[in-house]
Image: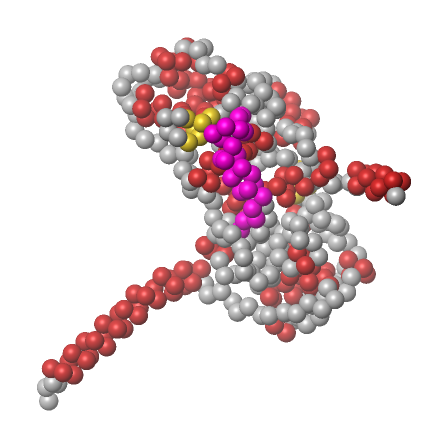
Amino acid sequence: MKASLLVLAALLVAMPGHPILLADEAVSGYDYLQPDMQAMQDDLFSNPGMLVVEQGEALFSTPGKNGKSCADCHGENGARLETKRIARYPVYSEELKRPVTLHGQIQRCWEERLGNSPITYRNEELLQLESFVRYLARGELVNVDTGGALASYYAAGRELFRQRFGQVDIACRQCHEYHAGQLFRGQVLSQGQTNGFPVYRYTEGQVTGLQERIAQCLTKLRAEPFGEDSPESLDLEVYLSARSNGLRIETPAIRY
Amino acid sequence: MCESADSLVKRFRHYCRGVLCLVLLAPVALPANEAGKPPPYFEWQAVNYEINAPLGGLTGVAERGRAIAGDPLRGNCLACHQLPITEEDFHGNLGPSLEGIASRQSTGMIRLHIVDQSRFNPETVMPGYYRRFGQLHRVAAEFRGRTYLSAQEVEDVVAYLATLK
């Protein structure tokens, strides 16, 4: 009995391409890249995502409509921003009674502190600022709270991660947990970790935010993407961010 | 002769009913017209993990099936399987290689694999290319009420795979 169980366990571990039993540990998308792509990400002079980070850096000290800039509150080049705090996003806002993503917080500052006109999620300047702020926390370990006020959002996001969508009728986790490391049309599937976002997508040739990336996946499943300000987007971002806890922030990461 | 007031009222009512019908039908009719009418769904029966009768009694053409299997926007079989389609560079390995599949499986079993792989593996990541579209979530508008491939396309792919001996 004992021996047959051992043989069974050995077989399951030895089965190629089925890391189900080993998927407890979060693995960065970096580890699924070819060495030349890893080198491109590591070398900030050749990393194409740095262009967007630098655009964000310039915006950071550009005054808004009311004459104030991000740097007025957060210091020159974000010197007064705490990197450990950046690594905790999304955080729960007592004031708004809901979680706030880093992206959403910058959007609020843009409108309320800088007095600029409202912008949508896919706004380029917003993506540039988010890339710059996340870049400041490069190397910091992702540390999103999964308890307290965020617990219910985390649980709802996890449900979405396991929910099948679209005409293709598969769930996020089927590809990004059960099949991570295998090839989909020549492209390696990663665990879908979020520690590198916003990422430079090599296949698209541009920097992409997390919600945009989720929408791309859903479109591939022939599903209707979530609305920008929908509860689903927020739940999923809380879950996906916390799922990367313990991984180093790599913004701007390079991914296929 | 002048029509009586009574018959004019009747004609007016009839007209109104017609307009109302058009208005009520419009939201249903318009998207179908935009995307083209969904083709009829042919029912199928699986016995012992095989669908022996071709969908809708259609005949597949292997050459067309080969093109569908390699086309990223249609079958996209190459996304997950290896096939003897050497002019395409990017194959996947999520699923097993399909080289020589016809020497391992009957045509009826190949057909069920394509139509509804979840009959073999409920956790599959393979789309059910001709599954009944019952309990799907958030299907994009353009694909609602449709199967992934048409019955003819499925039969074409079946005919192609049946040549891989």
Q: Which residues are magenta?
A: A144-166
**Residue A256 location in percent, x, y?**
60, 34
Left/right of residue B104 with respect to residue A217 in the rendered view: right
- Whether residue A136 appears in this view of the structure is no
**Residue A74 location in percent, x, y?**
40, 13
Q: Residue at x 67, y 30 (%)?
A: A25
Q: Nearer the viewer, residue B88 or A178?
A: A178
**Residue A159 location in percent, x, y?**
55, 42
Q: Residue at x 63, y 35 (%)?
A: A191
When the figure is inspected, residue A102 is found, relative to residue A218, above or below; the finding is: above
Q: Residue at x 84, y 41 (%)?
A: A5
User: How would you classify the magenta stretch by its main secondary structure?
Assistant: helix
In the rendered image, the quadrant that contains the N terminus of chain A is top right
**Residue B62 location in percent, x, y?**
69, 64
- B58 within the magenta span: no
Q: Nearer the viewer, residue A144 or A67?
A: A144
Left/right of residue B96 with respect to residue A254 in the rendered view: right
When the figure is inspected, residue A11 is found, relative to residue A123, above or below; the finding is: below
When the figure is inspected, residue B67 is found, relative to residue A143, above or below; the finding is: below
**Residue furthest out toward the bottom:** B1
Q: How many numbered marks, from 0 up?
A: 0
Q: Residue at x 52, y 17 (%)?
A: A84
Left/right of residue A56 with respect to residue A44 in the rendered view: left
Which colour assignment does the render follow?
secondary structure
